[in-house]
Amino acid sequence: MFKHVNKILKKHCNKISRESKVEGIGIDSYSKKFNLSAHLSILAKGIIKKNDLTDIAYNNGISKSQLSKLNNKRPYTISEKVFYSLLNTFIKAHRYDIYHDYLDKLYSILAIDSTFIETMVNGSGIYQREKRRNGIKIHIAAKTNHYALPLKAIITPANVNDSKVFDDLLWHINEYMSGNTVLTFDLGYYSYDRLKELKENNINFVSRLRKNADYTVIKEETFNSKIVGFRNGLELRLVSPDIDNKRREYDLFHLI
């Protein structure tokens, strides 16, 4: 597995390194031993193995200070370029550039979600002396039809609330939104004002209902579907399926 990771990263890093030299960035000048591909390779392997900084340094014959210097001095935009270089290869491999007109005629489902990536496990180093967890969050907007296609990713510290990043992600994927697009997201992005704004902008969406949600039933439509209203004037369809012989108030819909 790691052999393939190294091979893929080396190919894309060499491309970015050549482009950066032309731009005068000189990203490989920070360390003769650890050029960009070697640097990202040891970080990628460390993430896969859930190693922290101490373990990564120990396992790769590099001091923590040298690794920290590489992490801090190499522009973060370089990692972004490598990410999009990998992403573009994925897109071309699936020929989305050719078939997107056909796919967009169907209902296009876009999902917004985040994931926590641990950069320091419980305890630091080989002997697990420290008791803390650090990490980052990756907030992703992706097209989910047929296969998952990431459209935009935003990296934040782990303690940033998901809801604060939602509007930025929505702005970046605006070009992919159309009348047949359905946006889906979980309770981490839940806000009555946000749901109202999405509806006013004619954006189709599906989300979960909070357990403590306060609403009024406006109209019963079927045995498991009704129109409900909230205090801010928002009206949505609420679907309540039977799960394990119990009626569950589950999903909120706005579909044009």
Image: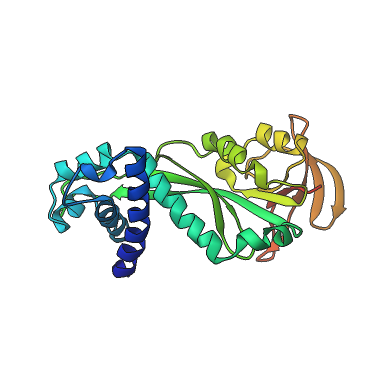
Q: Position of residue 75 (x, y in %)?
A: 33, 38
Residue at the extreme front of the image, as rendered: 22
Q: Residue furthest top?
A: 232
Question: Count the marks: how many?
Answer: 0
Front-most of 212 and 55? 55
Q: How is the image coloured?
A: rainbow
**Can the viewer see residue 13?**
yes
Residue 242 drawn at (x, y percent)? 71, 62
Is 171 situated above or below 237? above
Which quadrant would residue 1 be assigned to in this image? bottom left
Residue occupying image coordinates x 57% and y 66%: 94
Q: Is residue 66 left or right of residue 102?
A: left
**Residue at the spot 61% in from the left edge and 37% down from the top edge:** 171
At 28% across and 50% down in the image, what residue appears?
36
Residue 135 in sight: no
Residue 14 location (% of width, % of height): 33, 55
The image quadrant that residue 74 belongs to is: top left
Q: Please, is residue 55 above or below residue 68 in the view?
A: below
Position of 107 compared to 218: left or right? left
**Closer-to-camera residue (159/83):** 83
Give whichever of 146, 41 is nearer the camera. 41
Residue at point 28%, 43% (across, down):
27
